[in-house]
Image: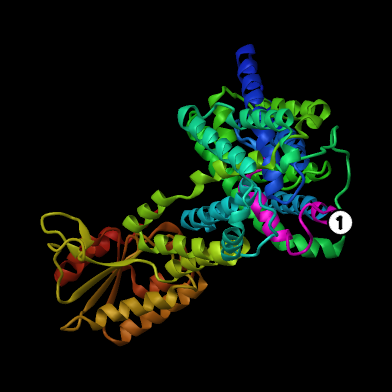
Amino acid sequence: MQITPTGFFSNLKNYSFSKLQGDLMAGITVAVMLIPQGMAYAMLAGLPPIYGLYAGLVPLLIYPLFGSSRHLSIGPAALVSILVLSGLGDFANPMSPEFINLAILTAFVAGVIQLGLAIFRMGFLVKFLSNAVLDGFTSAAAIIIGLSQIKNILGLDLGRTSTVIDTIENLLWNLHTTHMPTFMIGLASVVFILICKKVKRSFPSALVVVILGTFCVYYFQLHEKGVPIVGYVPAGLPMFQMPDLYFDSIKTIFPSAVIICLISFIESLAIAKAVAGKNENYPIDANKELMGLGFSKILGSFFQAYPTTASFTRSVINDSAGAKTGLSSIFSACIIGLTLLFLSTSIYYLPKAVLAAIVIAAVIGLVNISKAKFYYKTSKHDFWVMIITFTTTLFLGVQSGILLGIILSIGYILHRSSKPFYAVLGYLEGTTVFRNIARFPDAKQREDLLIIRFNASIYFGNSEYFREIIWSEIRQRTPKITYLVLDFSSIPTIDASGLQMFDQIINELHKDQITLVLTNVQGPTRDRLTLAGLLDKIGIHNQFLINKDAYTYTENPHGRHVLKMKYANQTDS
């Protein structure tokens, strides 16, 4: 696996001044969005706001060197932030030095896992988590995130709760203590951001409410009237510091690191492909994405960055603002660095209600009701997977929802693989075509003949099912059939267990005086059947390239020698 940043430099070939202009403007635009978002998401993760800016510095410098997307904007994000809080909150108090150290260690471990997956080219693992699971999880997480920020909008000083029910109950019991100036600032900020999103998505509404909110608090001295503010923020770039690599700490955060590794990868890959689709569909390499994300987390953790991932909003804005290469992210990182050096103290009076409003406005669109309707209409299975994942995440917690989602996805794959689709075929008169009799009522069947098409590779997990459906269909036929034709056109391969089961089927058919005929056997499957001696056992005269010839063969005993000579020396590819 190549780990040199060749992709980034290849994108800089024939780099022009117009591309530089596009990258620079996009970098500035994304940085303007990331500064307030980063601080808001850091608080959501249970960290001081400055750590959101730390997470928007080194990761943005590193990802473009190794990732395959030209437009992906890496940094703090809502979903991963809530995963950090929910995963680590039971082991340390949010905002405490111990919690901060665990969050940074989580970034390091999650990055190491992603880099390991990249080296062993395991990017295909993303396919084992269905969209229904992700949609259910994301929708529930959005509600959890929104509810967690309402207390900051209302100006309530509430303790951390463990479930959604407790959160709602706590809010209702303390609603009468709402601090109205804080509520007005928070509500106005949410409304303003949502209106700006409708009118012009690229408008830096979050930065505007940060500036206006900070000015109002400072000018009217609202912090002296009870409006919670960010307070002191240390100036300067983050210092190089090794994460605390103690075994007990790694063991504590490891489950959270694995979940963050998977979710950040899946989310980033989906965003990268979506943005690439708008730009001539340039290729996105899953393993390079793992590498870029892994290195950005590992090296970011040395400079006090908590786990990062791609932001859909910032990536889309990066594209629409004119980004051409990964240099746009590097420009964004430079602006974040300048902010840390010269402007961090200016956010002392920033109200926490504004940061909560930024988070709430960001996650409102993540509750995907339209997807639930789509799944209900097209696939009841996916609908219930989404609902179960949503419900589990909402009421039992984020990590429980993710783990159940993974189990449901893998379970569904195993179920579909162990009991794949099959069809009984019939002949459409006047053609050479055979079709599923369940879908083509006009397809003809003969009483002495049964044609079955099995639509999957035969392996140890479904070989017994293969045998069961054959005998189930045979027993349903009255009178008893004389010929069984197995259409192998949809069986790309067969493993050792499948070969042994197929041998058993051949013996059982022979004992029951049923002639077995094979058609459309694919090359790899034919090779394995030959090596196992099963084709010789079936006989060359009982093998054909198309169903029509097998049909004719079994229908006209006197013409068998003609077809036998025709196919004796032919094999499928």
How dense is the environment of label 1, judged by Cα within 10 Å: few (below 14), some, or many (20 and up)?
A: few
Q: Residue at x 33, y 76 (%)?
A: 469
- Camera sees residue 310: no
Q: For the N terminus, which image quadrant?
A: top right
Give coordinates of residue 245: x percent, y percent: 86, 56
- Residue farthest to the bottom, as pictured: 511
Give coordinates of residue 215: x percent, y percent: 70, 28
Q: In this rendering, is residue 250 above or below 415?
A: above
- Camera sees residue 107: yes
Q: Which residues are magenta?
A: 75-100
Q: Disc 1 designates what residue?
A: 245
| Magenta stretch holds residue 66 | no
Between 544 and 59, the one lying in front of the other is: 59
With 251 as the anchor, is 486 left or right in this view?
left
Give coordinates of residue 409: x percent, y percent: 51, 63
Res 404 quadrant in image: bottom right
